Amino acid sequence: MEHNGKLYIETVGCQMNMLDSELVVAALRNQGYELCESPKEADTVLFNTCSVREHAEHKIYSSVGRLKYGRRKRPNQVIGVIGCMAQKDQQKVFEKAPHVDLVVGTGQLAEIPRLVDEVRTTRKKQVAVSLGRRDGSRDAVAGSFTSYDPLRDPQMRPSPWQAFVRIMIGCDKFCTYCVVPTTRGPEQSRPPSDIAREVRTLAEQGVREVTLLGQTVNSYKHTEEGRLHRLSDLLEMIHDTSGIERIKFVTNYPKDMTDDLLQAMRDLPKVSRYLHVPLQAGCNDVLKRMKRGYTVEDYREMMQRINATLPDCAVSSDFIVGFCGESEESFQKSMDAVREFRFKNSFIFKYSPRPGTKADDLFDDDVPESVKKRRNNELLALQTAISEEDNAEFIGRTVEILVEGPSKKASRERASMDLPGWHDAAKLEATDDGAGADTVPADSSGAAASAAMQLVGRTKCDRIVVFDGNPRLAGTLAEVRVEDCTATTLLGAIVTREVQHGSAGLLPILS
């Protein structure tokens, strides 16, 4: 059936989902599809979903519901629900949203181009999902979840200079509140040679920072050519890739924070001094019900080793408030943990039961919603105060940042003025004829692309920095003097240098 070749994709959830969307878009672009900004324009609409929190599922079903009657005018439109919620709900998606044509789980994303064509040809609903964790042997189930890392699409990345690299899929921790072992399957690590090859390809495309992804990324293990590779070995393998300036990795599991990994971070200059290590709760009784596999004392010992090996390392965390059986005393222990460990930032969530998890089967959701909300706000206020105090310590310092591009504020201003987006500007920069440093492409309004604007970047310890600067700095390392801060952001000014003509020094300029 005829279609207009336009593709709309909406993504919710983690960085893993963002990477999945990039790869799906690349595969469809390879068949001639073109991205658009509204589902009303597209004959192919995909929703890449998350099941970690109930709110994320409600958001997707609402978005899908808004397309229900638009099908009358677009009978050839294909609507697909893909990713974690698709793997979890499967046929339930069709029951809740009968106008959906396609349900594809996390392990079958490579099938999407074929399945979209199949729907258009037959107008029959298509389902492609992996085996459940109890539907076969571990090898059989693992084989039904495939790591999908073929093509890449730079336009879907956080910026032209940053890219995600999946080093493993799945999880075997089975925390009682979590659906990931079901929606992402058994833990599997990719061969290090494949990862190194992918990083080299990204560097050739202009990427300067790679973030290695895994549900528990520091659990990475893969034997290749008779040698066991851990995350520390992988970091060393990719560290000297020409063009790569920064390497990050998320998310870490406390019990797998080994000394060899900390020492690799210390000894490899390109590796960021930043670790995201969820604690989830500051009470051992709650951690036991969560089946997290460690105690607060274990976490404290890990933090002591981090601080001893990497005194300049920033650590962030996740917390769930209102988990089953969490008393006021238990919650106050989480408050105490935040005071003790002084996280750079924390992602704080109210517990919501997830069907199919052990917590939903074994425990009552016995904390009232009003109490969850209050605890969420109290923990967030404490974390905000700590973040403000710690960020203030940077005032007066000069920090090195990797410049990512325009800040959100600058991007909104460019959009309101109908100026090219950042990816368009990057393409423009890439096609510059090299006539000289003073030759600057102009945008559609005639304004010089080198006009100063508010830019954003991150320090080596992953603190966000905004400053006014030349957009040509994007994708480079620059020095910024910090002048002020908020709880989330350092505010600064670019450090300029005076150099003689013909010298080799870097000279950031404002305009």
Image (spheres, grey):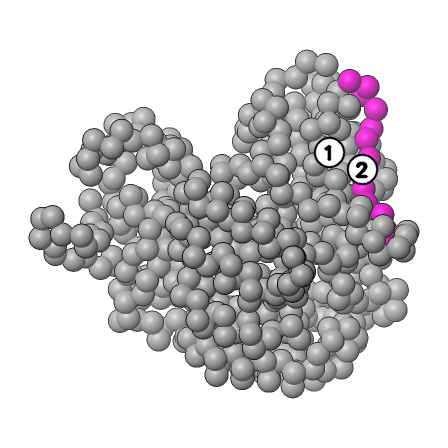
Q: Position of residue 80 (x, y in %)?
A: 72, 33
Name the image quarter holding the N terminus. Answer: top right
Say left or right for 78 vs 252. Answer: right
Name, please, the residue furthest toward the right: 135
377 or 470, nearer to the observer: 470
Say left or right for 54 vs 245. Answer: right
At numbered mark 2, what does the secondary structure look like: helix, strand or loop? strand
Say left or right for 12 vs 503. Answer: right
The residue stretch that appears in magenta = 121-133
Q: Residue type at mark 1: give it.
A: Glu
Residue 128: numbered disc: 2
Name, please, the residue furthest toward the left: 500
Residue in the picture at 77% in, 73% down: 291
Residue 44, magenta (yes or no)? no
Residue 426: numbered disc: none
Say left or right for 446 vs 410. Answer: left
Is residue 58 at all visible to an observer of this figure?
Answer: no
340 or 28, nearer to the observer: 28
Residue in the picture at 49% in, 43% down: 201
At numbered mark 1, what does the secondary structure look like: helix, strand or loop? helix
Residue picked out by circle 1: 111
Q: Position of residue 22 (x, y in %)?
A: 58, 40
Label 2, residues with CA under 10 Å away: few <14, some 14-19, many ≥20:
some
Label 1, residues with CA under 10 Å away: few <14, some 14-19, many ≥20:
some
Name the image quarter holding the C terminus. Answer: top left
Q: Residue type at mark 2: give it.
A: Ala
Q: Position of residue 141 (x, y in %)?
A: 83, 51
Residue in the picture at 25% in, 32% down: 434
Name, please, the residue furthest toward the front: 226
